[in-house]
Amino acid sequence: MKSGFLGRVGLYLSVSILVSPAVLFFLWMISLSLKNELDNTAWPPVFIPNPPTLANFVDVFEKNDFLTYTINTIIVSFSATGLALLLGVPAAYGIAKSKATRAAALILIARVTPGLSYLIPLFLLFQWLGLIGTLTPLIITHLVITVPIVVWVMIGFFEGLPGELEEAALVDGANIWQAFLYVAMPLARPGITVATILAFIFSWNNFIFGVVLAGRSTRTLPVAVYNVLTFEQISWGPLAAAALIVTAPVLLLTLLMQKEIVAGLTAGGVKGG
Amino acid sequence: MSATTAATIASGPRAYGRRYWLFAVPAALVVLLVILFPWIFTLFMSVHDWKVTGDTPFVGMANYAKMLHDERFLSGVWRTLYFTAASVIAPLVLGVWAAVCFSNNFKGRGLARTLFVLPMMATPVAISLVWTMMFHPQLGVLNYILTSVGLPPSTWVYDAHTVIPTLVMVETWQWTPLVMLIVLGGIASLPQDPYEAAILDGASTWQMFRHITLPLVMPFIMVAAVIRIIDALKTFDTIYVITLGGPGSASETINILLYQTAFAYYDLGYGSAMVVVFFVLILLVSLLLLRLRQREDLR
């Protein structure tokens, strides 16, 4: 669009106003995590850690079993994402090819339903099955988040593919499974990347399923970091450090894969939970 | 193309069409287990007096009747609607503004957009903890900023009157990016000719926004509004971590009350009934809005 000098200034001003709450927030988070307790509770606040200390991070790992929780989170979000790809990519292909809008609507309903509403019955079910205290209930419930994301993103991608290549394969005698596996899948790889990242992030971030279903040793990081808040009397440094540990992988992934993430989010209005 | 078409006709297009649903069978089975089973079981529990231990006698509609006279639930509904309305309007206004800004080409746009999107990708629990520290009435950085520019300090989440506006602020900070992305996608798909014509006619930037961009991206804004309403109704992590429904019950939305009923008081029957009502509410709102959107499209 056309814009003169004033327009340019206004634009940069607007962007600064819009972006600064996010930037300042994360800078303050980093600042809190790198300061000792004295500086963190000082008034007026100390903005720049001087000298910065990693003691808070050491403290978090020493006082809590964060290593176990990290491994738990990795197992849960990797399994939930992997399973969702196995289930969701073919399903999206089937839905896109047969133009089954009803099935797509079902996926939308999963997007609409509050996460809590799955939890009461599933909690009882897992209790009867004796699975409480293992990671299995978490992986299964996380599918509620990851499967709809994968299906939703992939329907859009498969619908965007030309389809002529698969038809050519079918004419040459391939069956629909082969056409899917050897023709459509390689073409859809960018879509699979987007779906994987988004499913992984929203599974990693999930709190509500863990807070109900996880036992002492099966906590995921978001649940563990919440417990740092409840059990340790307000010590801000370790709290901010714990929060940063939990969310840093996600923030880094977002910064590195911004194009893919923006494409995926724009397509589906995706959000987990 | 014609050869392909001929071949498809020869071998019967229906044969292909029919078998594609097989691809969705495994996913459908999982959906049945993880999504449909809970719904049916929730309906079943909602008509029983279901505590974690002991008998679970059938009580008919008693749990639903109880809700009608439950002060706590009813004020929870109003609170949820208040929180939702504010958490939809603010991100929509800011999100459209942001989308218009980001639709321009400028130096550093990619980085600025990524930074802008970070709040919605960050782990909600983690950001909630940091907000909690920032809201601290004596030592929080927000009150320092307010007082240093000459404004009175706020009570943030520590007072019944300010707690919901404060939570709305967090929600707005977190979810404006999603609105921005959806509307930005809409702006990117707009034709360029109306703008060129408007420039020739000497239209101002505001006039172009008001009379060209806004009407054309309205369908996208509606989609963003629906998504926002649903998400705002469902908000859990931030409220749970920052206030747990407090002070008192000043920020206890349906979702928080639901959690407390089921997993703190273990009244699963009553909790299930609340889930059913809550879900119907969400479904009605989304259907209503989708209907509105369709009518908009027809025009």
Image (cartoon, coloured by chain):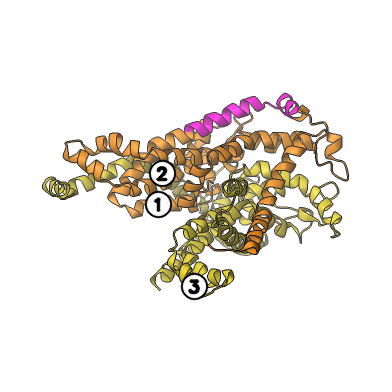
Chain colours: A orange, B yellow
Q: Nearer the viewer, residue B165 or B277?
A: B165
The answer to whether tags 1 and 2 share a subunit is no
Q: Chain of mark 2?
A: B
Does residue B281 appear anywhere in the picture?
Answer: no
* Spatial CA span between label 1 and label 3: 48 Å
| Residue under label 3 | B200
**Circle 1 Cα neighbour tier, 10 Å, few/some/many (<14 / 14–19 / ≥20):** some
Badges 1 and 3, same chain? no
Decide: marks 2, 3 in contact (CB < 8 A)?
no
Q: Nearer the viewer, residue A194 or A65?
A: A194
- Chain hosting mark 1: A
> Which residues make up the magenta segment?
A57-79
Residue at which label 2 appears: B31
Q: Residue at x 58, y 26 (%)?
A: A71
Would you place residue A162 above or below residue A249 in this image? below
**Image position, residue B164 (x, y; %):** 70, 58
Q: Quadrant of residue B55?
A: top right
Q: Quadrant of residue A169?
A: top left
Which is nearer the eye, B225 or B270? B225
